[in-house]
Amino acid sequence: MKINVLYGRLAFPEFFTPKAVNDGDKEAYSGTCILVEGKTQLLIDGKRYTENLGDVLNKIADKIATEKWKDKAPAILKQLRAQDKIFLHDGDNKPDYDGYPGNLYISGRTPTKPKVLRKVDGFLRDVEAHEGLVYGGCYGEFIFDVYAQDNSYGKRLNASLKGFRFQEDGDAFGAGAPAKDSDFDLSADEEDEESLA
């Protein structure tokens, strides 16, 4: 099932080079969407949700589990939630990470490179890694495909990250974003020009 998260905060983006979480894991692209209380909206099957987003996403989890496991779904869901093996997580469980406490978040992984877009010079275009135009801490729209997993790796409710569209700068996490043109002190150049006159 496709879920558009309108205006979430990006954390731990691995959009351009796939990585394995643990030794022996398959490499994958990934990213985390922190839901922003009062600003994030969900778009699901053409319907927009603006409130009680945790309840909405938990109902989606219930629906996906029921479609997959039928009568066994309630017991399996109880176990998956206890083991934090569903796509929706509580940010209070990551108190040492900026932006997480007090918010819910969705983590998504995918073996296929997600589409990453940003408007540059008035045009929406694909972003490359070396440009530094998306970073942990910025805001944007996320597209996830949520589904039930039941294979040799176990049972889970997963989110596959399909795309991210940059919407707004934010305080960067970790190393942060590169400087913007407006960050530079251009007055020094003007003084140099005056001294040459």
Image (spheres, helix red, strand yellow):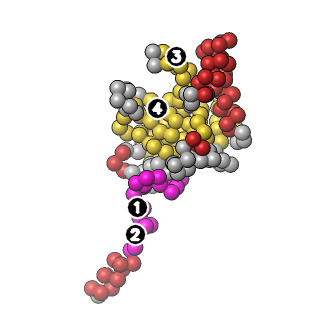
Query: How busy is the neighbourhood of tag 2: few (under 14 within 10 Å), some, or many (20 plus)?
Result: few
Which residue is depicted at the point 52% across and 49% down? 96
Residue sticking out furthest to the top: 71
Question: Label 1 near label 2: C-beta < 8 Å?
Answer: yes
Q: Is residue 124 visible?
A: no
Distance in Å between CA atoms under marks 3 and 4: 16 Å
Mark 3 or mark 2, earlier in chain = 3
Distance in Å between CA atoms under marks 4 and 2: 36 Å
Check if residue 129 falls in the magenta segment.
no
Q: Amino acid at mark 1?
A: Ala
Say if 135 sits above or below 115 in the image. Answer: below
Q: Amino acid at mark 3?
A: Asp
Residue indicated by mark 4 = 109
Check if residue 169 falls in the magenta segment.
yes
Asked which secondary structure carries label 2, the reply is: loop
The magenta stretch is 167-186
**Viewer-side label of 3, 4:** 3
Residue indicated by mark 2 = 184
